[in-house]
Image (cartoon, rainbow, N blue to C red):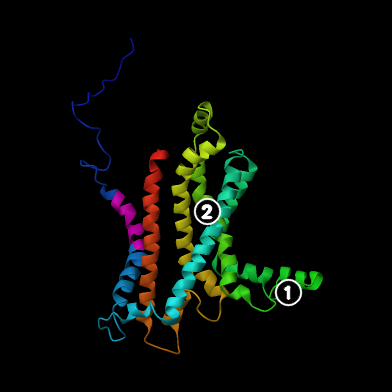
Amino acid sequence: MTSVAPVAAAKPGGSTPKKGGAAGRPSVAAWLVAVPFLAFVGTFLVYPTVLVLFGAFQDSNGAFTFDNLTTLFTGVVFDAFVRSIELSALTAVIGAIFGALLTWAIAVGNPDGMLRRTVVAGSGVLAQFGGVPLAFAFLATVGFEGLVTKFLRDNVGIDLFAGSAWLFDLPGLTLVYTFFQIPLMVIVFLPALDGLRPQWREANASLGGTSWTYWRHVGGPILTPPFLGALLLLFANAFSAYATAAALVSQGSPIVPLQIRGFLTGEVVLGQENLGKALGLGMVIVVSIAMGVNVLLQKRVAKWVR
């Protein structure tokens, strides 16, 4: 005769015990595991943000002032903000459009195919490829003496730098930033395309709908929020990028991150560190707005991917 282990009966109206403690709180071991991460975030994110917040409202003597913030709306500082927003918006739109097309190409193919695995793996690498290595790659390719530049000049008679050194200004930054914006779009937007269920298209077809009907009433409304959210993420990514621009642009400060570098490390005009912190506070506000809208868009589409 087979014996059956007794099973404790659930109490009426009771709930399943939660992990971590009597009230579902994290255990001491969980907090200890999280301590290194919390220390890292506090040291490299919270503490610098607090310094920027307080320093933006202080002059060189430590007295309270609004002059640093009012300077953001005047002269070259304001122009740097405008150029940064233009650069970020342009590269975000280009990266979102071409990245979405590339994502669609691999999403409709074989989910286990070589094309998908290659593109996803390459995107994961290229999205993080920036700074000095990326700047050097473009200088070696399309710089003044780059491989492509010399080939076109010697064999085709085309001078890529005829009339301007575009690679070291906003046009060049646009080209370089797009290099990592497109792979980032692939990584961010692919889960949204994979979330489109085949049953939705089949239901549309069974009811006599066309492809236009499907995209107009089903696919489009579902993909619009994640597409806009990815667009905002790309904008914030480009707006906060520093290392690539710093390695490529050696003279001048056309965008805000380079302006901040000039105020913090400038040797000509001293005592402007707090103005650089005010610029940092402005960047924090812009990025926070973009990420806040992104969170709202993600909440809007979350019900479709449950």
Q: Which mark is residue 241?
A: none
Q: Regarding mark 2 in the picture, which secondary structure is present there?
A: helix
Q: Position of residue 90 (x, y in %)?
A: 53, 63
Residue for point 18% across, 28% down: 13
Q: Position of residue 290 (x, y in %)?
A: 40, 60
Residue 31 within the segment the image draws in magenta: yes
Q: Position of residue 78 (x, y in %)?
A: 42, 77
Residue placed most toward the observer, 8 or 41: 41
Residue beneath disc 2: 185
Q: Is residue 242 above or below residue 266?
A: above
Residue placed most toward the observer, 38 or 230: 230
Residue for point 59% across, 40% down: 108
Q: Which mark is residue 159?
A: 1
Whether residue 127 appears in this view of the structure is no
Residue for point 50% across, 49% down: 189
**Furthest-left residue in view?**
12
Of mark 2 and mark 1, the one earlier in the sequence is 1
Question: On the picture, is 269 further left or further right than 120?
Answer: left
Q: Amino acid at mark 2?
A: Met
Judge depth for marks 2 and 1 and give the one in front: 1
* Magenta stretch, residue numbers: 30-41
Residue for point 55% across, 34% down: 210
Q: Amino acid at mark 1?
A: Asp
Whether residue 137 appears in this view of the structure is yes
Question: On the picture, is 304 further left or further right than 127?
Answer: left
* Residue 268, picture quadrant: bottom left
Q: Is residue 85 above or below residue 188?
A: below
Q: Position of residue 169 (x, y in %)?
A: 57, 75
